[in-house]
Amino acid sequence: MLKGIITLLSFQFLGECISTLFSLLVPGPVIGMVLLLIFLIIRKSSFPSLDHAVANHLRYLPLLFIPAAMGIITQADIISKEFWAILVSLVIGTIIALMFSAKLMDYLTIKQEEKR
Amino acid sequence: MNVDALVEYITSTPLTWLLLTLGAFKFGIIVYEKSNKQVLLQPIIVSYLIIMSVILFTGTTYEEYFKGVEIIHFFLGPATVALALPLYNNLKYIKSLFVPIMITLVVAGVFSILIAVGLLWILGAELPTILSMTTKSITAPIAIITSEQIGAIPSLAVGFVIITGIIGALLGTTLFKMLKIKHDTSKGFALGLISHGIGTARAIEISEKAAAFSALAMGLGGIITAVFLPLIIQFIF
């Protein structure tokens, strides 16, 4: 699995370097992700060690964002002041967005089928 | 016995917070599996509540807690890179529905941000909250690093991400039935695009096709949001 971990870290490193060098606004790890994707497309396949490292990282993905998420305890002010605005935006916004996305995708898919 | 020294050790070592966080998460996984994967009992929610209670009860500051678990936070970077693999594995599906995928990705992706931000704005929320809402539909690791980039509040952003995921997972299937959505690919794509990983976990229960399209939407949505959102926000301000 070491080779897989080195691969992930190298692509992150490369992404961060590119982001810093060109003062890009895109986060380094995202550049690393795109580079790894291009690498896999060119290579035409993954390798077991990478599969392994990826599976281990993604298996516990939610654990990885607990440290950042816990910062919410410092935001009690904003949350109590804007509670209703946040709640409405999250619930209504998500419902409408989900309906819109599914309907749009379905409509375009059916359109494409008819053309064929 | 030197109780004072022991208390001093426990309250100062990062191990305390590391163990609490890992232990609480493991407990969260057990609860989630025992409950037959109830969406509201996600491991993150159960462990989050446990850890938050301990932090508040002991009067620990966020800085102290974060220092203890910084090593966990570090892995967000490689985990983001790791997202390339599931995206790669599902990339072959792009060809079959290239035009619908690209149009939905851009139009629905932009629409979902605008509707959430618009609602906040109408209801009088302030700028940091509005900025933190812009990353709500992308997977949490990318949302955290992108929200840092655009001057939003990362913790608020993750909170919004998780809640958006849960709403989608809870209501998705009902909404799709209501709208008479025909294709599983559309259901999956919408779930992944709006409700990222939590939506994708739900899509797995619909069908394999839905899961693949959900993973595809989550990966593509994460990338284009991380690339264009900072540019657009810099352009506006």
Image (spheres, coloured by chain):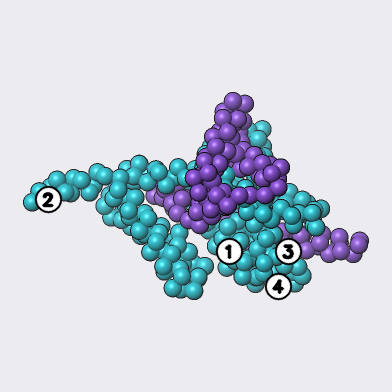
Please determine whether, in this image, residue B32 is positioned above or below residue B129: below
The residue under label 1 is: B201
Instruction: Answer few, some or many: residues within 10 Å of disc 4's Cα (few below 14, many 20 plus, some between 14 and 19).
Output: few
The percent coordinates of residue B172 (x first, y second) are 63, 67
Q: CB under 8 Å between callouts 4 and 2?
A: no
Q: Residue at x 75, y 72 (%)?
A: B180
Q: Give the chain of mark 1.
A: B
The residue under label 2 is: B3
Amino acid on which the number 1 mark rests in the picture: Ala
Q: Residue at x 67, y 54 (%)?
A: B89
Amino acid on which the number 3 mark rests in the picture: Thr
Please determine whether, in this image, residue B13 is positioned above or below residue B39: above
Q: Name the quarter where the C terminus of chain B is drawn.
A: top right
In the picture, measured across the screen, residue A108 lies left or right of residue B193, that is right
The residue under label 3 is: B185
The answer to whether residue A46 shows anywhere in this view is yes
What separation in Å lies between label 2 and label 3 (alpha carbons)? 61 Å
Q: Give the chain of mark 2.
A: B
What separation in Å lies between label 3 and label 1 (alpha carbons)? 15 Å
Q: Which mark is residue A27?
A: none
- What is the drawing colour of chain B? cyan
Q: Are marks 4 and 3 on the same chain?
A: yes
Asked which secondary structure carries label 3, the reply is helix
The residue under label 4 is: B178
Asked which secondary structure carries label 4, the reply is helix
